[in-house]
Image (cartoon, rainbow, N blue to C red):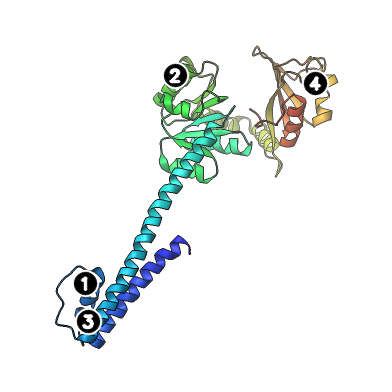
Amino acid sequence: MALQQKVITVIVLLALLIIIGTAGYMLIEGMDFVDSLYMTVITISTVGFREVRELNTAGRLFTIILIISGLFIAAFAVTVVSTLVIEGEFRHILRRRTMEKNIARLKDHYIICGAGQTGQHVINQFKKRKVPFVVIESDTAKVNHIIEQGELAMIGDATVEEDLIKVGIEQAKGLLCCLSNDADNVFTVLTAREIRSDLLIVSRAIEEKSDLKLLKAGADKVVSPNEIGGTRMASLILRPAVVSFLDVITRAGQVVIDLEEVSIRIGSSLVGKSLADARIPEQTGLIVMAIKRSNGETEINPGPLYILEEADSLIVLGKEEQVGKLQKLAGHDIPLGYGL
């Protein structure tokens, strides 16, 4: 019997016992409804209050049966309540330990600090692209919601070094600060940078000029949602055809086409080849839009004689499965999260 059914059974049995007891005293002892209900309640609860009046032999036997029945139902109720408490606590402990083990196994993952509106958009993109990540958030309800969706999350403070270590910052590939105020974002960046000098850190900036503070604190990149939103609104007015074109190529019906970044790893067959010899469009169907060198220089619309090198990042346009083909050519054993 399921636990919920047991709870319902206890309530039904208790109600039936009260009804039977009340009716029994009315029939056997000739009491009115209130006195019969009173006798039933004090008998079942065994509080020891005085009887309404002296009972006859039949009434005493009925009371004995009522007491025994009440004790059985009480014992059953205690068992159900104990099971509820123990199972609930056990489930909570088991889920927490499982979550901690899964987080401890993470490597080359991303840490999302904050699960507000910005953080949720990041989560959705990472889920879509199957990128390994863990969320650290102080709001218990938000953490539970993320866990219910099957993702990794932990209740904690991203500004605290110990909590960042718990979510695997020492093995992480990057950290995204999506907290609700700039002060917390700055402090998180400072803390994360102190732990890992080589960690890729991207932060959200809310107030004007906060981007400079975040960059000084150690962020590699800073994004201002307000600035991006304003720029897009202006573009929709000033360059509607361009924006419409970009929307079309990234949301072509049910087929997702997007700009992606794929780095060339050591041992890749592409290393040392020209773009013409690599034949990336022919092999994958992708369009190579740009190439970013390891020194930070970017070649827009590279020519066919461009020689590919290790650590070059190819900016390509195409579908997810096409990007997966390029990742294999670029030396990725398992396709990584697209665009990261």
Task: Say whether disc 4 or disc 2 marks the residue closer to the N-terminus.
Answer: 2
Label 4 to label 1: alpha-carbon separation: 86 Å
Point out residue 46 in the picture as x, y percentages from the top left corner. Answer: 22, 69
Q: Secondary structure at mark 2?
A: helix
Residue at image coords 27%, 81%? 62
Residue at mark 2: 190
Residue at mark 1: 42
Q: Does the CB distance between marks 4 and 2 fall below 8 Å? A: no
- Residue 209 visible at all: no
Query: What residue type is disc 2 on?
Result: Leu
What is the tally of numbered marks visible in this picture? Answer: 4
- Asked if residue 44 lies left or right of residue 137, the reply is left
Q: Does the CB distance between marks 2 and 1 fall below 8 Å? A: no
**In the figure, residue 247 lies in which quadrant?**
top right
Label 4 to label 3: alpha-carbon separation: 95 Å
187, 104: nearer the viewer: 104
Task: Say whether disc 2 or disc 1 marks the residue closer to the N-terminus.
Answer: 1
Query: What residue type is disc 4 on?
Result: Ser
Label 1 to label 3: alpha-carbon separation: 14 Å
Point out residue 73 in the picture as x, y percentages from the top left corner. Answer: 34, 69
Task: Say whether disc 4 or disc 1 marks the residue closer to the N-terminus.
Answer: 1
Residue at mark 4: 269
Q: Nearer the viewer, mark 4 or mark 3?
A: 3
- Asked if residue 209 lies left or right of residue 259, the reply is left
Residue at mark 3: 60
Mark 3 surroundings: few (<14), some (14-19) or many (≥20) residues within 10 A: some
Label 3 to label 2: alpha-carbon separation: 78 Å
27, 184: nearer the viewer: 27
Q: Nearer the viewer, mark 1 or mark 3?
A: 3
